[in-house]
Image (cartoon, rainbow, N blue to C red):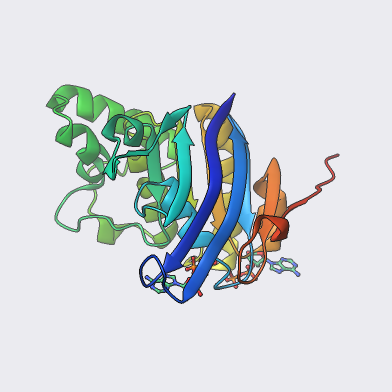
Amino acid sequence: GAAINLTNIEQRYGGKTGSVLALTEVNLDIASGEFLVLLGPSGCGKTTLLRIIAGLLKSTSGEVKINNESLWSDGQRNDKVMQELGVVFQDANMFPWLTIQDNIALPLKLRGVGKEERRKRAAELCELVGIKGFEHRWPRELSGGMRQRAAIARALSCRPRLLLMDEPFGALDAMTREQMNLELQRIWQESGCTIVLVTHSIREAVFLADRVLLLSPRPGRMDTLREIPIARP
Ligand code: ADP
Ligand code: ADP
């Protein structure tokens, strides 16, 4: 079934009648387990769309459903639905005063998970994302790529069914980025998550995605949200 369902999403900045129309008539179903990449040039509304799916922004109109439940009702965000989501941004946003393990396990701590279980889960996650052995290091002791791995681990800590990523490797050098693409593909296969990833890199999109949607420059109408066919060997 659909993990994410968007109906008639419209986003204006500057209030209901605001002058910047970032998205309009976006209708989209994302299947459970799918790896969807949103591709498009700067300013076409990719981040806006991801933030709307992540519940970080309430669209001016339209409806977002996650696993068939509305993300918003009566202007209130549905916290139960939010628990299905993990989000990764361009910057890892680690707390510098917490070790890698404590950063990764912070969402678990906030949910009242005990210390021993947090330690165990953080160790599992470090293994999954390829930073085993770095649990007790400080974020500044890790390279940018390793910090992004830790950010992915943190996003996965509460076992979300959906992983939303906004240019997760955009700040990394080209070599690290290639490596991270391979790693992410493996993480996706092992975790079984549905992933929505935003990028402006065609190469990254074609490498990672089951399905690539191209968001054209403004306004991001559905007729410009095109599927790009990708040939698989
Ligand atoms: P992308 O991620 O594809 O670069 P964005 O979603 O960031 O695009 O932006 C889409 C459009 O909305 C752009 O024209 C941008 O300038 C505008 N925009 C984004 N955020 C805001 C904001 N907070 N206030 C006003 N305009 C915004
Ligand atoms: P950036 O987001 O830093 O501007 P791009 O989106 O252009 O980078 O590229 C993303 C990744 O794809 C990088 O690892 C880059 O080395 C690689 N890449 C981009 N264009 C090409 C190309 N024509 N041939 C091979 N690799 C490319």
Placement of 169 over or under 36, stated as above or below: below
154, 198: nearer the viewer = 198
Q: Which image quarter is the C terminus in?
A: top right
**Residue 18 appears left or right of 138:** right
Place residue 225 in its image quadrant: bottom right
Place residue 129 in its image quadrant: top left
108, 228: nearer the viewer = 228
Location of residue 96 in the rendering, given as x and y in whole percent from the top left corner: 19, 58
Which residue reaches farthest bottom? Answer: 19
Location of residue 179 in the rendering, given as x and y in whole percent from the top left corner: 58, 53
Question: Total marks drawn?
Answer: 0
Location of residue 36 in the rendering, given as x and y in whole percent from the top left corner: 62, 44
Location of residue 131 in the rendering, given as x and y in whole percent from the top left corner: 39, 43
Q: Which image quarter has ligand 2? A: bottom right
Placement of 122 over or under 9, stated as above or below: above
Which residue reaches farthest front? Answer: 17
**Residue 40 appears left or right of 3:** right
Residue located 23% across and 45% down the image: 103
Q: Which image quarter is the N terminus in?
A: top right
Placement of 101 over or under 158, stated as above or below: below
Residue located 20% across and 55% down the image: 95
